[in-house]
């Protein structure tokens, strides 16, 4: 049960919070977006608005020449895990991001305020179905495993050493591709941030992309963006 719930929450995080809300890689209906957002919130990482804001802030900071170690992952895995899980960084001149389209949805605002409490929405039916053992495995154990895996991937994918020369800064962590539904091909994501497909090359597993294809066939997703439909990358346009 914990594995199934972990896979569903990761699906919501990868396809919903990351590819749809953070990168606008595809369009979908309001209800579909809300369901994906709720599943993503169950990872225990953040609410939909908070996650998108943190994502944009990290991307902005990583483009700066003198970015703080909080964003560049120069420190150890343990240091960054503690920083991200228990701390926050306050910038003197923080950039402003237009998240009005997210904040206009009352359901997403509610999920953002109550993202920690959403585990209780899941815990109640789990208790009814199997008592405390199912609750323990389905909520705290699953959340601890998912959050640890997420920050481990984020750390490895952004370490300054070993950056991929194929595209733009960002490490591929191939051994984690199946578990993260394709999020581990991070150099591709840096190169094509608006692409719904992250595993771009032969042998690169991308379960999130397969799910988006399924949504598209069902009429639940449209305007799906891939490198083939996006034109040249900014770097290529600048050097061509």
Image (cartoon, grey):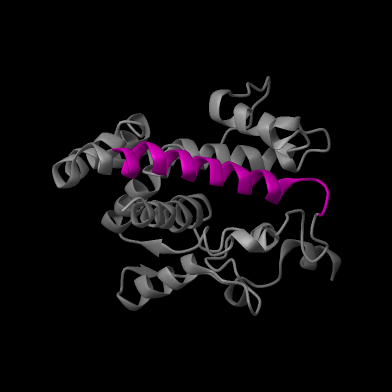
Q: Is residue 98 something that shows in the picture?
A: no
Q: At which x and y percent is residue 222?
A: 39, 70
Q: At which x and y percent is residue 202?
A: 65, 80
Asked if the stretch drawn in magenta spans residue 142, the answer is yes
**Left or right, residue 169 beside residue 33:** right
Q: At which x and y percent is residue 14?
A: 48, 55
Residue 220, quarter of the rendered image = bottom left
Taking the view exactly as shown, the residue that stands out farthest to the front is 133
Q: Is residue 124 above or below residue 15?
A: above
At 38% from the left and 36% from the top, the residue drawn is: 140
At 45% from the left and 56% from the top, the residue drawn is: 20
Q: Is residue 81 above or below residue 19?
A: above
Q: Is residue 11 something that shows in the picture?
A: yes
**Left or right, residue 185 beside residue 167:** left
110 or 178, which lies in front? 178
Q: Which residues are magenta?
A: 136-162
At 47% from the left and 45% from the top, the residue drawn is: 146
**Left or right, residue 55 beside residue 11:** right
117 or 169, which lies in front? 117
Asked if the stretch drawn in magenta spans residue 195, the answer is no
32 or 176, which lies in front? 176
Q: At which x and y percent is residue 49?
A: 44, 38
Q: Main secondary structure of the magenta part?
A: helix
């Amino acid at each position: 049960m914990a594995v199934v719930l972990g896979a569903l929450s990761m699906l919501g995080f990868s396809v919903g919070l990351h590819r749809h809300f953070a990168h606008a890689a595809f369009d979908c209906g309001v209800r579909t977006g809300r369901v994906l957002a709720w599943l993503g919130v169950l990872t225990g990482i953040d609410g939909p608005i908070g996650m998108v804001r943190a994502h944009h802030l990290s991307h902005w900071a990583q483009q700066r020449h003198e970015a703080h170690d909080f964003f560049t992952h120069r420190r150890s895995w343990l240091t960054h895990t503690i920083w991200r899980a228990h701390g926050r960084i306050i910038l003197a001149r923080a950039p402003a991001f237009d998240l009005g389209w997210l904040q206009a949805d009352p359901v997403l605002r509610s999920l953002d305020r109550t993202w920690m409490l959403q585990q209780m929405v899941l815990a109640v039916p789990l208790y009814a179905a199997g008592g405390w053992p199912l609750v323990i495995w389905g909520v705290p154990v699953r959340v601890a495993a998912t959050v640890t895996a997420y920050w481990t991937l984020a750390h490895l994918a952004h370490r300054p050493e070993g950056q991929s020369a194929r595209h733009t800064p960002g490490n591929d962590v191939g051994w984690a591709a199946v578990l993260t539904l394709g999020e581990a091909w991070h150099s591709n994501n840096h190169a094509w941030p608006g692409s719904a497909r992250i595993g771009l090359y032969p042998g690169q597993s991308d379960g999130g992309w397969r799910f988006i294809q399924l949504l598209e066939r069902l009429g639940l997703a449209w305007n799906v963006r891939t490198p083939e439909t996006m034109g040249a990358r900014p770097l290529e346009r600048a050097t061509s």
